[in-house]
Amino acid sequence: MVSNKFARLVSWSLLSIAYTQAALLSNIADIPTNVQFDFIIVGGGTAGNVVANRLTENPKVQVLVLEAGPSDDGVLLSQVPYFSAELVAPSQYEWNYTTTTQPGLSGRAVPYPRGHILGGSSSTNWLVYTRGSSEDYDRYAKVTGDLGWSWKNLYPYFKKSERWTAPVDNHDTTGQFTPSVHGYSGEVGVSLSGSPSAIDSQVITASSQLGGPFKFNQDMNSGNEIGLGWVQSTIKGGSRSSSSTAYLAPQFIARKNLWVVVNAQVSRVLQTSRTADSVDANADGTADATGFVPLFRSVEFRNSAGGPLKTLTATREVILSAGAVGTPHILLNSGIGNSNSLTSLGIRPIVNLPDVGENLSDHPVVATAWFVNSTDTTDNFRRGGQLLDDVLQQWQTTKTGPLVNPILNHLGFARISGSLAPQPDTAAGPNSPHYEYIVANGGPPGPTPPTGNFMTMVTVLVSPSSRGSIKLRSNNPFDSPVIDPALLKTTTDKLAMRASLKAATNFVTAPVWNGYIMNRAGAFADATTDAKLDSFIAANTGTLFHPVGTARMSPKGASNGVTDPDLRVKKVSGLRIVDLSVLPFVPAGHTVASAYVVGERASDLIKFFHKL
Ligand SMILES: Cc1cc2nc3c(=O)[nH]c(=O)nc-3n(C[C@H](O)[C@H](O)[C@H](O)COP(=O)(O)OP(=O)(O)OC[C@H]3O[C@@H](n4cnc5c(N)ncnc54)[C@H](O)[C@@H]3O)c2cc1C
Ligand SMILES: *[C@@H]1O[C@H](CO)[C@@H](O)[C@H](O)[C@H]1NC(C)=O
Ligand SMILES: *[C@@H]1O[C@H](CO)[C@@H](O)[C@H](O)[C@H]1NC(C)=O
Ligand SMILES: *[C@@H]1O[C@H](CO)[C@@H](O)[C@H](O)[C@H]1NC(C)=O
């Protein structure tokens, strides 16, 4: 499908109009050669587009975004909320990664989806909007020695990025969220579900019948995350709201100083030769013999698969926003990482930062399902045919109906109690969860069985102790990286996952489900002992797609870590990282809200640093 933006651009190129306006481009050659970029942002993903937007508020600042994937414009699977789970399949919108064999998953390798599209993973994710626990952020402040990362200081940035929006069915939302904790004039649409699900009232009744880990929480985005509540999603007017649709909306992409080039994959950042004006007295780290630290303000990229390599240099900074897989991949290819490992791969080491690619933490997830005594579940239209055609037509004509919802209506967070709790505690604090449960009125994501109606509960280990890594496969920057998310690697995590699964699935014991929830479905039916549960978990756990930590921040002057708390890469100048790879721990929630808040705070840090 040819997008309007592209159509406009193509016609400009064909007509060779003498002026070119900043825009969404597919060819770098369409930017006049006299434009000097103050900032080059690598990756037009979730956080990258926030920075692109905020920096170009100042018309004097020229910003270039290089995004490896195609435009998201007109991509139906990205727009329709209920279709979000389809986007994990290999396609041009996916990096198509697979993990190494995972010892914690009885040696299986699992798919490792990452968005390869403008908007990054915010254009392909499952739309759940959770900020995590206030203690997650207070822990970032503590381990970085910078109070700017505390919940209290980030709270205004959560609101700044958010535009709370009424659900499309305009139902009475009283008691389903807390208005005061939301933002109403930001960019990213956030909404409650816009189409009721048949089990909504039973879920709320079960919460009050059971209490404990299922007690009701009116708004888990208040900082107090624990309990069960109504899902909030990055949805506006029945469609996905992403960092592309929000931060690169038409009024922003029209700015004359913002240039976004898609199909542009960056291979490396390169050392830039020094001129008198490039001395960065504030750079963190050790100066070389000449009194300088290496300056990295150039990027090497290609604008088409197999195309020639090109180089561009920014006058102020290169900002890496390629995500928790892409950013360490680029750093390592650039000679920034563990010098010994780089040498053994035939890459000239330039800066020894052994933590690049290390300390990856991610959320293991396992789905369980039950047959239900009902025909009113999403399984019906998910099987395709006329029912699917009908709900899609409803979405296309009126932006209403079941496809305006994400794949769940409720979720909750809880702590493992008593002797089964991880020791020492892996959660960010005593009010932070160990696990999450998701409740859905239909079968789990993936192919729907030909018959049957289901209820699904998904259990997620949100405070894992395992740490994985991103490494290079070869010295070819276009080779995919070696991804080891270390899912359930530690015994602590294995035991915590079993305890979490048992606790979460207790939800079906609420009296309200009598006569509704029937037998366990699939392999879960046989998982009746601890040993069998462990085998079920090993055979069925995957990722919830939340990697962080691979370029983690640490205190100013600390020898470990990859960036300082201002997100500048240690031991170099001109290079900053703005994406989730900087978070030293994975937040105990879905991570997109954290990516937006990192982007918002980083934008202010950059403006302050350069007095913009
Ligand atoms: C399938 C899936 C489902 C998810 N579900 C949810 C959910 O429901 N709720 C939630 O909160 N979170 C969810 N997440 C996680 C969340 O979306 C991510 O944590 C977040 O979007 C990451 O933001 P980021 O800016 O760090 O990286 P990204 O948004 O991934 O951006 C990185 C960008 O850089 C580009 N890039 C990478 N390498 C290069 C290169 N060499 N050159 C140029 N460009 C490059 C990529 O194509 C991408 O556009 C999900 C993620 C996935 C993949
Ligand atoms: C992912 O796989 C699909 C289908 O095989 C392919 O079309 C697409 O180009 C691949 N993505 C990348 C980034 O290589
Ligand atoms: C980070 O990773 C390094 C290398 O694997 C490891 O030695 C270190 O303990 C990790 N640090 C944290 C905080 O996980
Ligand atoms: C299924 O539900 C109906 C009422 O909706 C009830 O009469 C019937 O007993 C239920 N079946 C089972 C097996 O519980």
Image: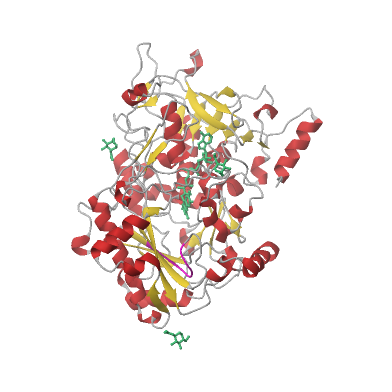
Residue 234 appears anywhere in the view? no
Question: In terms of image quadrants, where is residue 19?
Answer: top right
Can you say whether 561 is above or below 366 in the image? above
Question: Picture coordinates of residue 214 (x, y %)?
Answer: 35, 70
**Magenta stretch?**
437-444
Residue furthest to the left in view is 419
For residue 305, above or below residue 527: above
The quadrant of the picture occupied by the C terminus is: top right
**Residue 301 shown left or right of residue 256 in the figure:** left
User: Which residue is depicted at the point 31% across and 43% down?
Assistant: 467
Q: Is residue 440 magenta?
A: yes
Up/down of 297 relative to 389, above or below: above
Q: Quadrant of residue 228?
A: bottom left
Q: Is residue 282 above or below residue 502?
A: above
Outermost residue on the right side: it is: 15
Residue 454 % position (x, y) = 46, 71
Q: How is the image coloured?
A: secondary structure
Q: Is residue 279 visible?
A: yes
Residue furthest top in the image:
290
Q: Quadrant of ligand 4?
A: bottom left
* Residue displayed at 60% across by 24% down: 308
Where is residue 472? Give x, y as percent.
40, 31
Any magenta on residue 337? no
Residue at the spot 32% in from the left edge and 55% down from the top edge: 538
Please provide percent x and percent y for residue 474. Answer: 42, 28
How many numbered callouts? 0
